[in-house]
Amino acid sequence: MKNCIFALSLGLGGVVLAPGIADAQNAKCAERAMVVERLEHAYGETRQSIGLGQNNAIVETWASDSTGTWTIIVTLPDGISCLVASGESWEHLAERAAAPGNDA
């Protein structure tokens, strides 16, 4: 009986917390124009790289040389951009790939 009550309380706790988790995840996405404005004006970041991901999603790296902050966003075909990762200590590297057949 105690095990049953414990299991039910865990299930109820998960149902109560789930909407909060969903809201937190949704807060990381917005219209691309809003995300870009925030990155440029609040963090002083500019686009450093861009690439095409799965399902035609655009993957971008934004960073600030002056503050060292960086952000990776993914923009979906519907124009919604989502934060993937962010951090500090950004460094721009201009490394070249090793020549084929040479151990790097």
Image (cartoon, grey):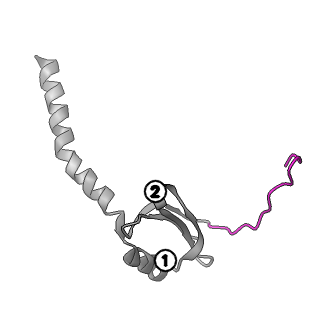
Q: Is residue 17 above or below residue 23?
A: above
Is residue 97 part of the magenta span, yes or no?
Answer: yes
The kind of residue on which mark 1 rests is Tyr
Which residue sits at x=63%, y=76%?
Answer: 65
Distance of mark 1 from mark 2, alpha carbons? Answer: 29 Å
Q: Which mark is residue 55?
A: 2
Q: Observer-nearest residue: 77 or 82?
A: 77
Which residue sits at x=80%, y=62%?
Answer: 96
Q: Residues within 10 Å of mark 1 (few under 14, many from 20)?
A: some
Q: Name the image quarter holding the N terminus.
A: top left
Q: Mark 1 = which residue?
A: 43
Is residue 62 part of the magenta span, yes or no?
Answer: no
Within the image, what quadrant is residue 76 found in?
bottom left
Q: Observer-nearest residue: 74 or 70?
A: 74
Residue 95 point in image, percent of width and height = 78, 63
Q: Observer-nearest residue: 9 or 27?
A: 27
Residue 71 point in image, percent of width and height = 51, 66
Q: Which mark is residue 29?
A: none
Nearer to us of marks 1 and 2 is 2
Q: Is residue 70 above or below residue 22?
A: below
Q: Which residues are magenta?
A: 90-104
Report the side of 1 relative to 47 (left or right): left
Within the image, what quadrant is residue 49 found in?
bottom right
Element at label 2: helix
Q: Is residue 16 above or below residue 58?
A: above
